Amino acid sequence: MKRRVWFSGILVLVMAALASAAVGDEKEKKAAGAGPPDEKAAMEAMMKAATPGGSHKKLDAIVGTFDATVKMWMDPSKPAQESSGKEENRWVLGNRYVEQHYDGTFMGQPFSGIGYTGYDNITKKYVGTWMDTAGTSIMTSTGESDARGKVMTFTGTSNDPMTGKPFKVTTKITVADNDHHSMEMWGPDPTGKSYKMMEITYTRKK
């Protein structure tokens, strides 16, 4: 029964996508005086959007199990708080997204986080989400990579627990080699000026 419900859900999504494409296509063809909508073209466009490619492949370097060393600046005028942890990253949904699981400590307390990073073939941008035990919000971000896929820069939003308002976050992932990469994060200080909030270095476990 569950399989039937799941399959029915997939069919609904496919039919909705085809219907949407057909409506748009039909309007264009009516304006041009053409015939019925091209369902084959709509299906081909949908399949192209759903197929992983070279931009997804650039995420291979962060897949695996890594030891993490963390530096966090709660106050830019004070020394960083240091901690360590472990991150396990794996491909999911047919190599479309990297699922990230982090376990470590935060301010002396156990800390866990889960994130997903992928590439949207339609918007031509990397996309990411992050959620952890330090809050109940989900951070969302979009980003771009350099030509070699060694540096990926993301811009996202998170919610400030003090003000209840969203604030901008910039993160940069730098791949040194297949066994080492880092993540840096910048956000606003109390005056609104951007400063480095966090730096994590990852070393692949052998």
Image: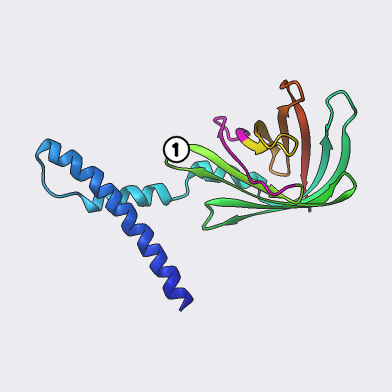
Q: Position of residue 25 (x, y in %)?
A: 22, 44
The colour mode here is rainbow
**Is 197 on the left or on the right of 54, as rendered?**
right
Q: Quadrant of residue 71?
A: top right
Amino acid type at mark 1:
Thr
Q: Provide residue 116's location: percent of width, then percent of height.
A: 61, 49
Q: What stretch of residues is rendered in magenta?
A: 135-156
The image quarter containing residue 192 is top right
Q: Which residue is tagged 1?
A: 123
Quadrant of the image containing the N terminus: bottom left
Residue 18 is left or right of residue 105, and the answer is left
Question: Residue 17 versus residue 51: which sits nearer the camera?
Answer: 17
Q: Secondary structure at mark 1?
A: loop
Judge whether 191 appears above or below 67 on screen: above
Residue at 56% from the left image edge and 34% from the top image edge: 143
Above or below residue 15? Residue 146 is: above
Q: Position of residue 193 (x, y in %)?
A: 72, 20
Q: Is residue 143 left or right of residue 113?
A: left
Residue at the spot 52% in from the left edge and 51% down from the top edge: 96
Q: Nearer the viewer, residue 6 or 192?
A: 192
Counting the numbered discs, the total is 1
Report the residue that reaches farthest toward the left: 33
User: For the view shown, which residue lies furthest in the bottom direction?
Assistant: 1
**Magenta segment includes 1:** no
Q: Residue at x 20, y 49 (%)?
A: 38
Q: Is residue 136 magenta?
A: yes
For the point 71% across and 34% down, the residue is 163
The 10 Å Cα crowd at callout 1, few under 14, some 14 to 19, many 20 or more, is few
Question: Compared to 142, does 38 lie above or below?
Answer: below
